[in-house]
Image (cartoon, helix red, strand yellow):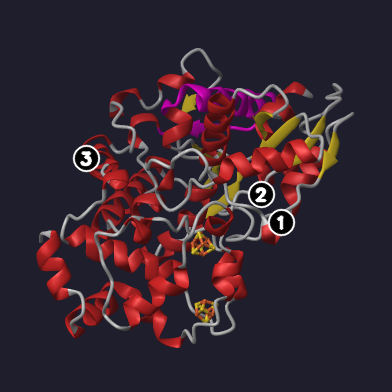
Amino acid sequence: MGRKELETVAPFPETIAEVREAGGEVYRYCYQCGKCDVVCPWNRVRDFSIRRIIREATFGLTQIESEDIWRCTTCGTCPQECPRGVEQVELGVALRRVASKYDVFPASVRSARAVRAGLTLEGNPLNEERAKRGDWAKDLPVRPFEEGMDVLYFVGCYYSYDPRLRKVAAATARILARAGVRFGILGEREGCCGESVRKTGAEQLFRDLARHNIKTWIDAGVKKIVVASPHCYHTFKNEYPEFKVNFEIVHMSQFLLGLVRDGRLKLEKPYPKRVAYHDPCYLGRHNGIFDEPRELLRAVPGLELVELADARQKSLCCGGGGGRVWMDTPRGERFSDLRLDQARDVGAEVLATACPYCITMFEDSRLTREDENLATVRDLAEIVEQAL
Ligand code: SF4
Ligand code: SF4
């Protein structure tokens, strides 16, 4: 469908029906109070109104070629504030499903096609070879998963392929081995969890990815899964049960804290730095895991933990959720820049977090800004390993 045809169709009731059919009927309860726009991080960097998007959907005026329907990072801040229980994230996903149906992607979102191709052919959004998914673990104390092991370590796409994040996976593997955990990985049998591509409207692709993982886990005899990405955690915990399965899912921050509490990890070496912890949206706001990462950091000798201006439920999104990690965000509009400023404002030497997207966004910001006063970025596992 071309732009002209879209403009012709937009004002008609068929558009309302189409958005509803895609799961977007949640807009019905909105009474346009605007509380969502007040808290949306986009309004710290540019003009954007989720309220306007809701109003347009209500009247069938949605323009699916608009960049605006791709802005929501699904951070989950505005649903907390809505007095009418409107699920803004669901509406946004529904609009992207409609745009995807017509294969309409604005310029900054064109990468969506390559991402979907990579996921379809290789099982990861980076279009890396499936056969090389386990290569990061060569020369490390990591074995293929076998039935009867304590846990499956589900590594995730970014930790498997991205050079920066492979360091985190390696640190994690060394920590688990040091604690005597009997763990294994699936290597090329592992595939993308599908969380983020689902948020871009690719529902069938998500279902295919989820079925692949679930079948693999069942065939391999997996019962308990430890996972480092909050996006994988979220979808395994809250979305895979749609497929009538129920695996035990534990986030790495919880698992490592358990090892410390049980005395299997002894954090003895000092890490004398001022550290601010950034709550990833999908770990904190979406899943309520605020305390375990902080407790883990407090267990590190010499570490001084400080809070950022927007913390816990009010955490400022890094900008990478909802598939935005694959899209172009111009300088001046990056939430990650604001977050690094917040870390500098509290005098943090290190910005710690527990999410591959957050680390990617923060590291990109550090590179582009070249400001030596900005905090270095570390995953929890990297800090824990330093203290062993
Ligand atoms: S906060 Fe809720 S009711 Fe108010 S404008 Fe936003 S979606 Fe509508
Ligand atoms: S979920 Fe977050 S990014 Fe999306 S509209 Fe709400 S506040 Fe804005």
N-terminal of the pair, mark 3 or mark 1, is 3
Q: CA distance from mark 3 to mark 2?
A: 31 Å
Residue drawn at 36 percent across, 56 percent down: 70
Give amino acid for label 3: Ala
Left or right side of 381 for 12: left
Q: Where residue 279 is drawn, which disc sits there? A: 2
Q: Position of residue 347 (x, y in %)?
A: 82, 35
Which residues are drawn in magenta? 161-186
Q: CA distance from mark 3 to mark 1?
A: 36 Å
Q: Which residue is mark 1?
A: 312
User: Cβ–Cβ below 8 Å for labels 3 and 1?
Assistant: no
Looking at this view, is 292 or 65 the one in front? 65
User: Cβ–Cβ below 8 Å for labels 2 and 1?
Assistant: yes
Q: Is mark 3 within 8 Å of ligand 2?
A: no
User: Cβ–Cβ below 8 Å for labels 3 and 2?
Assistant: no
Helix or strand or loop: what does disc 2 sit on? Answer: loop
N-terminal of the pair, mark 3 or mark 2, is 3
Residue drawn at 45 percent across, 33 percent down: 158
Q: Which residue is mark 3?
A: 117
Q: Position of residue 292 (x, y in %)?
A: 74, 49
N-terminal of the pair, mark 2 or mark 1, is 2
**Secondary structure, magenta segment, majority class:** helix
Residue drawn at 83 percent across, 42 percent down: 306
Q: How many marks?
A: 3
Helix or strand or loop: what does disc 1 sit on? Answer: helix
Give amino acid for label 2: Asp
Q: Which quadrant would residue 69 be assigned to in this image?
A: bottom left
Q: CA distance from mark 2 to mark 1?
A: 6 Å
